[in-house]
Image: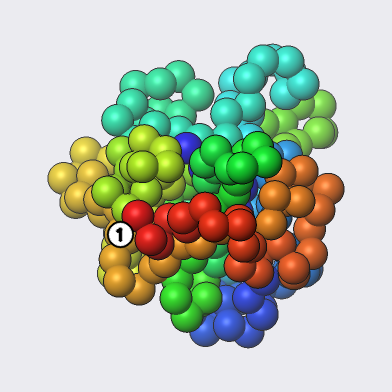
């Protein structure tokens, strides 16, 4: 699964990397959780960054405050699961991050692990989004697509977010759902350009959102994921 992310890249870096414009305020975030906003590039606005709320509300929902608001969408059932099938067909997006987190057992409880590029550059996760509206009220929300974890991650969690290869990003936005290429771009990328390490357990609460939470955290002799 994917339940926390970060994005602290400068707006101009995001613009250059994804060939988009950043109009919204994108302050640095080191510990983004469900209910927060995520920076996205959508099928509707492929040339700019749009802020969407993390936790998808289907457009057909009676009440956004009742029922589940899934933060993740399984790759295997995107075209079948009721909350996602319409979004998969018409409303896909890139979720721009520069890291995400999973947890393992630590000597003092849950130990967060950070996954990022070695150069700390931003990258894209596959997402689906939707727009709910009623009587003038509107809410735009997003879920991150997940898949089976690659070997480097599966010892921590059996699922991982779909990291899109750079050459697959536009295909995810543009290919038709029944195009075999659409499924192909969901093969996750996690190679020598990525690494992982233990970070401060302070970030177990989303109230902690400062630059220090992405620093390496010494677990007192416990192996880091890079040493497995």
Point out residue 53 in the picture as x, y percentages from the top left corner: 69, 44
Closest to the observer, 64 or 6: 6
Q: In which quarter of the image is residue 40?
A: bottom right
Q: Residue extending furthest left?
A: 180
Residue 68: image location, x then y, percent: 63, 20
Does residue 170 appear to the left or right of 109 in the view shown? left
171 relative to 83 in the view: left or right:
left
- Please tell me whether residue 30 is drawn above or below residue 130 in the rendered image: below
Q: Which residue carries the number 1 mark?
A: 189
Tell me which corner region of the image, top left, top right, bottom left or bottom right, holds residue 226: bottom left
Q: Where is residue 2 in the image (x, y as percent from the top left)?
A: 52, 42
> Callout 1: 10 Å neighbours few (<14), some, many (20+)?
some
Q: Which residue is drawn at 77% across and 21% down?
A: 65
* Residue 191 seen: yes
Question: Residue at point 67% right, 41% down?
Answer: 108
Left or right side of 188 for 24: right
Q: Position of residue 44 (x, y in %)?
A: 52, 54
Pick out the residue farthest to the front: 221
Q: In the rendered view, tell whether residue 85 sits above or below residue 163.
A: above
Q: In which quarter of the image is residue 61?
A: top right
The residue nearer to you, when weighing 108 against 104, is 108
Instruction: State which quarter of the image contains the C terminus.
Output: bottom left
Identify the residue at horizontal 19%, vertical 45% (top origin). Answer: 179
Residue in the image at 71% along x and 62% along y: 213
In front of the other: 145 or 81: 145
Say if 65 sits above or below 149 in the image.
Answer: above
């Amino acid at each position: 699964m994917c339940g926390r992310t970060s994005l602290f890249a400068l707006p101009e870096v995001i613009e250059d990397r994804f060939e988009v414009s950043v109009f919204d305020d994108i302050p640095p975030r080191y510990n983004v959780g469900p209910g927060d906003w995520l920076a996205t590039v959508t099928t509707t606005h492929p040339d700019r960054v749009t802020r969407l709320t993390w936790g998808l509300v289907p457009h057909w929902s009676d009440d956004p405050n009742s029922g589940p608001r899934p933060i993740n969408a399984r790759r295997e059932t995107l075209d079948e699961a009721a909350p996602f099938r319409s979004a998969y067909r018409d409303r896909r997006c890139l979720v721009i991050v520069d890291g995400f987190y999973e947890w393992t057992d630590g000597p003092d409880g849950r130990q967060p692990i950070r996954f990022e590029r070695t150069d700390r550059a931003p990258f894209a996760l596959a997402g689906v989004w939707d727009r709910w509206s009623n009587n003038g009220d509107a809410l735009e929300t997003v879920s991150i697509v997940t898949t089976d974890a690659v070997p480097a991650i599966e010892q921590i969690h059996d699922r991982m977010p779909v990291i899109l290869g750079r050459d697959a990003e536009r295909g995810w936005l543009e290919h038709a759902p029944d195009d075999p290429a659409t499924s192909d771009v969901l093969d996750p990328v996690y190679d020598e350009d990525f690494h992982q390490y233990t970070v401060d357990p302070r970030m177990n609460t989303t109230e902690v959102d400062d630059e220090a939470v992405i620093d390496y955290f010494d677990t007192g002799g416990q192996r880091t994921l890079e040493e497995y």
